[in-house]
Amino acid sequence: MQDLTAEPHEPQPGRNMVVEKNSALNRFFQQRPLLATILLLVLFIVATRIFSYLLQYIIKDWHLSFVVKNIIGECFYAVLVIIPLSLLGWWAQAGFTRGIQRKHIPLLIAPFIIIALPSLLGLSATAAKSSTQLIILSLIASLLVGFTEEGFFRGLLLRSALPLGIWPSVLISSLLFALLHLSNVLAGFTWNYVIGQALFAFGLGVLFSALRLRTGSIWPGILLHAAKDFPGLILLTINPRQVLSIPLNVALLGSGSTVLFYSSMPLSFCAPVR
C-alpha cells in the first residue's frame, strides 16, 4: 500500500539539476510549513500589488491593450516565482526538471477534454475577430500566466505545505489560489466574474495539484492552464464586456458544478509518483 503522506519521489539530481539547499531558510520551511506557505503568499501579494500600482501610474498615458499590460505584469510575477525557487533550490521538487512521460499521458486525457478542449474549440470564432498580433500576444500571455500561477501555487506553495501531508497541502494551496483571484476586483473586474473565477480556480487547483503530484511534473498543469486561458485573453482584449457581464447565478452554477467535478477527479490518482 502506498504511503500517501510521503513526499513525491523526484528524479535523482544530475550535473545540471539544482539540488535542494540545506540552509536555514529550507529548515524553516520544513519545520514551519503552514507559516512558511502563508508568508510566501503574503510576500507575493504585497510585491504584486506594489508593482501593479506603480505600473498603472507609469503607463497611464501609454494606451496599452489589456493583453500587453498582462504580459508586462506576468513577466514581473515570473521573477517572483523564479527567485524563491532558486533560493530554496526547489526546481526539481517543484516539478520543473521532469518532463511529461508517456506512461502519464492517459492521466491527462480527461483534464484536456474538460479544461482545454472547449476553449480551443471556440478559438476559431474568437481568432476570426482578432489580428495575428493579438493572437501571438495572447499566446505569450497565456504561457506566462501558466508559468507564474502554476509555478507559484503548484510549485512553491504546494511544495512548502507538503510536510503537512498530501491532502492538506493540496487543499491549502488550492484555497489560497482561489482567494487570490478575489483581488481581481481591484483590477476592475466585476464581483460576478470574480466569484465565479475564484470557485473555478479552487477546482482547477485541486486537479492541477493532483496532476503535479501524480506525474512528478508541473508542465502538464502549465500547458493546460495556458490552453484554458488563451482564448479568454483574446476575448478580454477585444470585448471585455461580454466576459464581465455574466450574471451571478450563472457564474455560481457553472463554477460550482466545475468545482465539484474537478475536485472529485483527483481522488483516483492523487498518490505521488514512484
Image (spheres, helix red, strand yellow):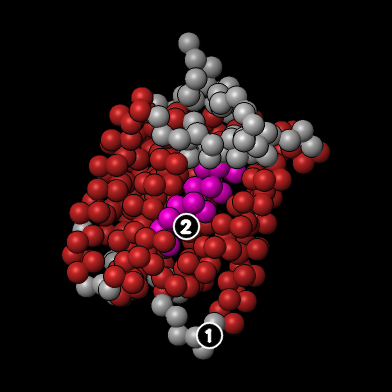
**Location of residue 74 in the rendering, given as x and y in whole percent from the top left corner:** 52, 62
- First in sequence, mark 1 or 2: give its number: 1
Mark 1 → mark 2, Cα distance in angstroms: 23 Å
Residue hosting label 1 = 60
User: What residue is pinned by disc 2?
Assistant: 144
Q: Specify the amino acid type for callout 1.
A: Lys
- Main secondary-structure element of the magenta-colored stretch: helix
Where in the figure is residue 49, as x and y percent of width and height?
Answer: 61, 68
Which residues fall within the magenta stretch? 141-157
Q: Residues within 10 Å of mark 2 (few under 14, many from 20)?
A: many
The residue depicted at 77 percent of the width and 41 percent of the height is: 25
Residue at the spot 52% in from the left edge and 42% down from the top edge: 154
Q: Nearer the viewer, residue 18 or 73?
A: 18
- Kindly tell me whether residue 67 is visible in this rendering: yes
As drawn, is 114 to the left or to the right of 155?
A: left
Mark 2: which amino acid? Leu
Classify residue 113 by image quadrant.
top left
